[in-house]
Image (tube, rainbow, N blue to C red):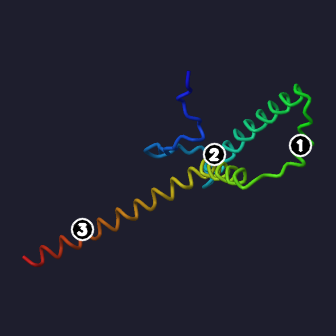
Amino acid sequence: MTDTATSPDSRPRAFRHARGKRPQFYDTPGLDEAMGMIMVLASELCVIRDRLDSAERVARAHGIDLAAGIETLQLDQAALEEREARRQDFLQRLYYLQLKDADEAAQAQTTAAQTAEGFRRTIAEIAEQ
C-alpha cells in the first residue's frame, strides 16, 4: 500500500481572509491586533513544548542523551533553509492581521485611483461631445 497523502509541509498554503469588519474588544487602537499576535505566539509555544517533550521521552526510552546531542549539533545548509522557511511561515501567521490590513489598504488605494481615473475619463468624454 502506498501513501498518497502529502505531508502538511509540502502542500501549498492558501491564505483566506474573512470579509467584513472585525469585532473590536478593546478601545485602545492596535490592542486587538496585539492580542491576536500574543495568542498566535502562545499557541506556537504550546505546540513546540509538546513536541520537545515528546522528543525527550522518545529519546530517553531509547537511551539517548538528547540534551548533549542538541548542544553538539551542526546543521547543514538544507536544514538551515528548512528552519528559515518554517520561521517565515510562522511570521506570516503572526503578522496575519497587519498583512491583511495592508493588503486591504492597497486594494482600496488602487480602487480609488481607478475610480478617480474613470471619473476624469467620463468628464473628458462629456466635454468632447
Nearer to us of marks 3 and 1 is 1
Question: Which secondary structure, mark 1?
Answer: helix
Q: Where is 88 relative to 114, above or below?
A: above
Q: Residue at x 56, y 55 (%)?
A: 98
- Depth check: give the residue in front, 124 or 58: 58
- Residue kind at label 2, given as amino acid type: Gly
- Residue kind at label 3, given as amino acid type: Gly
Question: Which secondary structure, mark 3?
Answer: helix
Provide residue 5's location: percent of width, then percent of height. Answer: 54, 30
Q: CA distance from mark 3 to mark 1?
A: 65 Å
Residue that protrudes farthest toward the bottom in the picture: 128
Provide residue 65's location: percent of width, then percent of height. Answer: 92, 36
> In this figure, which residue is indicated by the disc labeled 1?
69
Sequence-wise, the earlier of marks 2 and 1 is: 2
Would residue 68 appear left or right of 105 to someone viewing this image?
right
Give the number of callouts: 3
Sequence-wise, the earlier of marks 3 and 2 is: 2
Q: Disc 3 vs disc 1: Cβ atoms closer than 8 Å?
A: no
> In this figure, which residue is indicated by the disc labeled 2?
36
Instruction: Say the numbered circle drawn on residue 118.
Output: 3
Q: CA distance from mark 3 to mark 2?
A: 39 Å
Image quarter for residue 126? bottom left
Provide residue 66's location: percent of width, then percent of height. Answer: 89, 38
- Depth check: give the residue in front, 31 or 116: 116
Question: Which secondary structure, mark 2?
Answer: helix
